[in-house]
Amino acid sequence: MFKILTPLFLLVFIPNDLLGQIHQMDGQHMNDRLGWSVSGAGDVNGDGIPDFIAGALYADNGLASGSAYVYSGANGTLLYQFDGQNSADRFGESVSAAGDVNGDGFDDLIVGADSSDNGGSSSGSAYIYSGVNGALLYQWDGQKPADRFGGTVSGAGDVNGDGFDDVIVGADGVDNNGGNSGAAFVYSGANAALLYQFDGQNADDHLGRSVSGAGDLNGDGFDDVFIGADGADNNGSNSGSAYVYSGANGTLLYRFDGQNPGDTLGGSVSRAGDVNSDGFEDLIVGAFRSDNNGFESGSAYVYSGANGALLYQWDGENSSDHFGWSVSGAGDVNGNGHDDVIVGANNSSNNSVGSGSAYVYSGAHGSLLYQWDGQSSSDRFGGSVSGAGDVNGDGFDDVIVGADSSDAFRFDSGTAYVYSVSAKYSITPMTAGSPATFTITGAAPNSSVTLGYSLSGAGPFTTVFGVAAMTPPINTLTVLSADANGDASWTVNVPGSVSGSTLYTQGLNAGFLTNALAESIN
C-alpha cells in the first residue's frame, strides 16, 4: 500500500462538463434565458423522486412575460409550465421550492416576477402554485412602483410553528428607509398572512437582493430566515451584509459583513445544510465582487449556524470570475455524513470567455470535490445553482446548474443541467497495522476504477478529467474491477509507517473523477 505504481491521470481526455450529467433542459426559443434561476422543487408529483424548477424570465407569452418550468426528476418530462401574465413581467426571475404550504402532502412552488405592474410599474409579484395540480394558491404584489417585489423568493420552512411551510420574498427596491433600502417579507403558508417584514436600514442597502430559509439555527423549534443586502455599507461603500432573523420573534440572530468596500456580500445567500455535523444548520453567502484574487474574482463564505463563526472561505481563481454570484447548499453529494455546498462563477473563462463554472466543496473539510465548466463563450454557466436532492435514486444528493446564455437550442435560449457525482468512494476508518476497506459504488458496470492518492495535501490540482482534490505527487493506489452493478471493494492492511498521516484520495472511472476523501490514519 502507498507504493508508487504509476502516475495517475495520464489517460484520454473527457470534458468535465459531461461529468455525471443526468438531465439537460434547454430553452424553447431565442432569448428565453432558461436557467436564469433554478431550484430543487421537492417531490412535486409524489413519485418519491425530487423534481426541479427553472425560470426563463424573457420567455414570450408576451414580450419578456417570462415562464417557469417544473420538470420530473425521474425522467426529465415537463410537469408544469407557468407563464407571466403580461409583457415585461419577467416571471421566473426567481424560482424556488416552497415546501408543503397547504398540508396536502405534496411540495409546492414559488415564482417571482419582479417587473409585473400589479401595484404600479415594476412593483413586482410572487406566486405560489400547488404541486399536486399546478393551481395558483396565493399571489402577493409589491405595494409601490419599482419595489421589484419577487426579485428573489424562497421557501422559509415552518417559521411560526403551525405545521405549514412558509415562504419569503425579497423586494430590494422598496424605499421605506430611503431609496432602494429594500425589504423582505415572510408569509404564512397556511393562510398567506404577512408574518414579518424586514426593512433595509439605509438608502441603497438593497435588503432582499437575496433571500433564503435558514433552517432552525438556534434550536428553538422555529425555522429562521436569511436575507442579503449587497449594497449595505457596514464595512465601506457596498461592502454588503447578510442578516439572519429568528422565526420565533423576528429578532436579529447574526449579521455578516463584507470585508472591503465593493465586495457586495449578500448578493446570494442560502442555507448550507449541516456542513460540520454539529446538529445545527449552517449558512453560505456570496460576495461576487470581492477582489481577493484580482478585480471581482469573487468569494463565498460558510458560517456556522451554531455561533456565527466563519467555517470556510473560497475565492475565485481569476479577475472577473464573479465567483459567488450564486451559492446554495448541495446536500450530501458524497455520502460522508456532511452536507456540501455549490458555488457559481458565471463569468469565469475556463472554457472560453464568460463560459462560467460551478464548484462543489466538501462540507467535511472544505476541499474542492467537483468542478463543471460552461461549454461555450458567454454561456454564464453557474449564474444559478441549487441542490436538487437525490434525483437519480443512488442514495447521494445531486445538483442543478443554470447557464442562462447557453445557445444549446437557439441564441441565449438558456439551459439548466442536473448533475450527479458519478461513482461514490468510501473508506472504513484507518488504523496503522489494521485492515481498511476501500469501496466504490455506482461505477460504470464491468469497468475499471483507478484509485489515486497523495500524502501531500488536498490540492486543488487541475487534470484533464477536472480538478482533483490531491496535491502532487499523485500516485496510483490500486485499480479495481467493478462488477455488473458498478460495485467494487478492496481490503488491505494499513502500513505502520503511515501512522499520523492523512490520506488524500480520489477515484477515476470512465473518465470521471469520484468524490474526494481525506482520511486520517490513526
Image: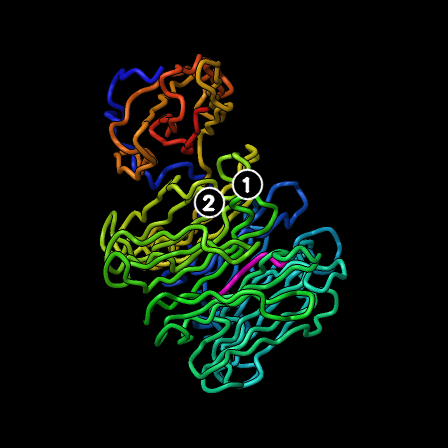
Residue 380 colored in magenta in the image = no
Colouring: rainbow
Residue bounds of the magenta highlight? 92-98
Q: Callout 1: few (<14), some (14-19), or many (20+) C-alpha neighbours within 10 Å?
A: many
Q: Sequence-wise, which precedes: disc 2 or disc 1?
A: 1
- Horizontal arrangement in the rendering, residue 247 relative to residue 452 (left or right): right
Q: Is residue 200 above or below residue 82?
A: below
Residue under numbered circle 1: 391
Q: Please identify the quarter of the rendering in which residue 422 is found.
A: top left
Q: Where's residue 378, x and y in %?
A: 28, 57
Image quarter of the N terminus: top left
* Magenta residues, dominant SS class: strand
Residue under numbered circle 2: 418
Residue drawn at x 46%, y 71% is 229
The Cα atoms of the two marked residues, 2 and 1, are separated by: 8 Å
Q: In the image, what residue type sits under mark 1?
A: Val
Q: Is residue 1 above or below residue 91?
A: above
Q: Can residue 153 be seen in this snapshot?
A: no
Circles 2 and 1: CB distance less than 8 Å?
Answer: yes
- Residue 5 vs residue 356, the one in the foreground: 5
- Residue 349 vs residue 504, the one in the foreground: 504
- Horizontal arrangement in the rendering, residue 59 relative to residue 101 (left or right): left
Looking at the rendered structure, the secondary structure element under dot 2 is strand
Q: Where's residue 350, x and y in %?
A: 25, 48
